[in-house]
Amino acid sequence: MASLRQIKTKISSVKGTSRIMSAMKLISAVKLKRAQDLLMAYRPYSDAYQETTLNVAKRCDPESHPLLRKTDEPKKLHLVFLTSDRGLCGSFNSSLIRKLETYLVADTKTYDEVTFSFLGRRGRDHFAKEGFKASSSYIGITERNYTEISEKVSEELTREFIKGDSDEVILVYNYFKSALIQEITYEKVLPIEASSESEDENLIDYLYEPNKKGILSELLPKYIQVRVQRAIQESMTSEHASRMTAMENATSNASDVIKNLTLLYNKTRQAMITTELMDIVNGTEALSKGDD
């Protein structure tokens, strides 16, 4: 049985850990609120931009711009994988990695080459050990620099696709639904193509000003940047939500541990007092018998 000193040390240690987890939960809650506000403000814009771009792409000949180029049998896949730099966020990273590993085994057999771009240290470090080819990697993504990073990533993806170094580009990230629910998403951003459900043979074309080529050269590359920025914001918001939830669970578990240790401390102390009282009673009886 542990001594009272050992139990008190454990209680003190768990209380210290609980205070740290509680503070991290509050910090994550503040970051989540800020990231969620940014995301909710950006979603309508990105959705409207996506709808406009796909409507224009639907009315264009695939040969009118390189980003509309479709390959009958794509052989070069580029995956943009978004994770976090730090841990302590529950299953945020581990679920993403497991799902992507399953996807690589089951759904990439038709490709001859799979290239990665990593946004976040956790995904980069894991797949670096597996020997996967990395085109680029970015760490230290925050609310202050995600716009610049999304521009760099989109420029690299666009340039690579136009050169023919990739046939398809897919974003893999956690889509933010709520503080408790984040959904793993695979979003194909290149080539740009409208969904088959919305196809119509009698589409009425737009009037383009100054001209169609000029509009496409501005609209399509910007679309890639908008989708990458949206994915980064979804991932960051999901990370803060996962960390807040994980810290809340850790704080709750610490409270349970403290409760159990306190109960053990009281039981041990009571047992020691009972033992001492028995020793006193036995000693008194021995002395009284000796006197008799």
Image (tube, grey):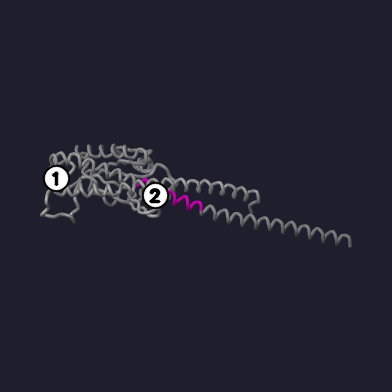
Q: Tell which residue pokes out farthest to the left in this image.
A: 202
Dot placed on the residue nearer the N-terminal end, 1 or 2: 1
Asked if residue 238 lies in the magenta stretch, the reply is: yes
Neighbour class for label 2 at 10 Å: few (<14), some, many (≥20)?
Answer: many
Q: Which residues are magenta?
A: 234-251
Residue closest to the eye, 33 or 185 = 33
The residue lying toward the viewer, choosing from 98 and 252, is 252
> Where is residue 75, by image quadrant?
top left
What's under tag 1, amino acid-wise? Pro
Residue beneath disc 2 = 92
Q: Secondary structure at mark 1?
A: helix
Q: Position of residue 272 (x, y in %)?
A: 70, 56
User: Horizontal and vertical percent for residue 259?
Assistant: 58, 56
Residue behind mark 1: 62
Quarter in which the N terminus is drawn: bottom right
Residue at 68% in and 58% down: 270
Local packing at callout 1 (Cα closer than 10 Å; few below 14, some 14-19, many 20+) is some
**C-alpha gap between disc 1 and disc 2:** 38 Å
Front disc: 1 or 2: 1
Residue 38 drawn at (x, y percent): 35, 46
Look at 27% across and 45% down and name the residue there: 227
Helix, strand or loop for the magenta stretch, by majority: helix
Image coordinates for residue 113, horizontal then vertical, percent = 24, 43
Secondary structure category for the residue under label 2: helix
